[in-house]
């Protein structure tokens, strides 16, 4: 057995095998997914450097252990311009914004990203804070999917929707899956809980099976907390260490096996962040919003955007006046690791919002970052709490 270094020639994630080209120019080495020494990213990416132990086999040299030499991270595509061929990625903790160019995306066919798409990547350091994402893979799993296998997911999500009844369907946007708001809520809630270390573990003393659970932050109609429960995944070479049992009340088995039940996710320390301060100036890059998000505006403005800057400015002024009359108009959301506020944009009818303006505190001012469709806005806002339906409802 020898230890060597090389670069990945290819790796088939579906079939869980690939080949490594040793740095010394010797014969390519076969590598199976079970040899990868990474509990989160159980795959390799074309071009990434690895260290491995090479052993002989009937079919030639094979890697017994493969260790990647550059860490990988997960995040979300913030935006991507197919015309320009580049965009931005936000890391899961929301602290790092990375430039990404299409040539660094590992994909078959046309290389592009979709806003909100989950991605895994390595980071290439640049001067100062100018870093970029490289070796970007677009079939990345969410933190919850990496944590656990989710068998009969739609069936269990339906059960959760009955336990915690709310309007979990989109109102305006067609969806291929049932309860899309609840699906998104559970995945993003787990991401936050995992970052906060609020996943609890226990053991069933009768079966000696390990268990895990997290607080969904939802409650039944009788205000009993609802949890997600898991048992360990005992399958060999399992990519996810846990298997979802289901969603259950605090008084149900197996929650009764946990000495302490974990707390729900926390997104803010200062309640003042949830309120819009009219004394702070709001600045907005109208041209940027229109150029990057024109497809979210009503069709008439997409067809003829010439008057849209003036219409958008008036809608923002109306939204600010509306907030001054009713503080509930500004609805908080959690994004990029920070609290932001959603303001209604009524482009034609003052009584009906068409879009939501995303506003965040930046230095001494509020900055208008982008616009969201109403379904997107509700989806984001529900992560913190069920929004008041003064203008935003599913």
Image (cartoon, rainbow, N blue to C red):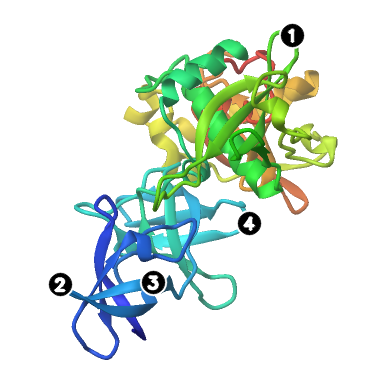
Please give the residue where the numbered disc 2 appears in the rendered image.
Answer: 59
Please rate how many residues cluster around mark 1, counting C-alpha atoms within 10 Å: few if below 14, some from 14 to 19, many from 20. few
Q: Quadrant of the C terminus?
A: top right
Between disc 2 and disc 3, whose residue precedes?
A: 2
Mark closer to the observer (2, 1): 2
* Secondary structure of residue under mark 3: strand
Q: Is residue 114 above or below residue 312?
A: below
x, y (%) of residue 354?
51, 21
* Secondary structure of residue under mark 4: loop
Q: Is residue 337 above or below residue 252?
A: below
Checking the image for residue 66, the label placed there is 3
Q: CA distance from mark 1 to mark 3?
A: 51 Å
Q: CA distance from mark 1 to mark 4?
A: 38 Å
Please give the residue where the numbered disc 4 appears in the rendered image.
Answer: 95
Please give the residue where the numbered disc 1 appears in the rendered image.
Answer: 222
Between disc 2 and disc 4, whose residue precedes?
A: 2
279 relative position to 1: left or right = right
């Amino acid at each position: 057995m020898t230890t060597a270094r090389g670069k990945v020639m290819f790796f088939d994630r579906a079939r869980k095998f690939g080949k490594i080209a040793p740095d010394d120019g010797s014969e390519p080495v076969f590598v199976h997914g079970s040899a990868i020494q990474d509990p989160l990213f159980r795959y390799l990416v074309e071009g990434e450097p690895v260290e491995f132990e090479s052993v002989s086999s009937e079919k030639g040299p094979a890697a017994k252990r493969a260790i990647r030499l550059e860490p990988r991270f997960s995040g979300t595509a913030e935006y991507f311009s197919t015309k320009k061929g580049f965009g931005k990625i936000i890391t899961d903790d929301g602290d790092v914004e990375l430039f990404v160019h299409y040539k660094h995306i590992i994909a078959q066919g046309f290389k592009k990203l979709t806003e909100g798409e989950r991605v895994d990547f390595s980071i290439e350091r640049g001067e100062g804070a100018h870093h970029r994402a490289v070796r970007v893979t677009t079939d990345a799993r969410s933190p919850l999917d990496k944590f656990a296998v989710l068998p009969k997911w739609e069936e269990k999500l339906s059960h959760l929707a009955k336990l915690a009844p709310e309007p979990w369907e989109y109102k305006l946007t067609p969806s291929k899956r049932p309860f899309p708001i609840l699906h998104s809520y559970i995945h993003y809630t787990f991401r936050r809980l995992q970052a906060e270390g609020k996943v609890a573990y226990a053991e069933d003393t009768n079966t000696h099976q390990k268990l895990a659970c997290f607080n969904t932050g939802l409650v039944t109609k009788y205000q009993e907390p609802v949890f997600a429960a898991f048992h360990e995944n005992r399958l060999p070479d399992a990519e996810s260490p846990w298997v979802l049992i289901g969603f259950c009340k605090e008084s149900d088995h197996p929650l009764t096996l946990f000495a302490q039940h974990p707390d729900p996710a926390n997104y803010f320390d200062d309640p003042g962040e949830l309120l819009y301060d009219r004394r702070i100036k709001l600045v907005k890059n109208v041209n940027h919003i229109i150029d990057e998000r024109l497809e979210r505006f009503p069709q008439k403005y997409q067809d003829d955007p010439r008057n849209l800057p003036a219409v958008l400015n008036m809608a923002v002024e109306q939204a600010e006046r509306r907030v001054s009359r009713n503080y509930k108009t500004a609805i908080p959301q959690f994004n990029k690791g920070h609290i932001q506020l959603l303001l209604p944009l009524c482009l034609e009818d003052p009584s009906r919002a068409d879009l939501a303006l995303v506003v965040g505190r930046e230095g001494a001012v509020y900055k208008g970052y982008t616009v969201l469709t109403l379904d997107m806005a509700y989806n984001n806002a529900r992560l913190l709490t069920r929004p008041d339906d003064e203008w935003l409802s599913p």
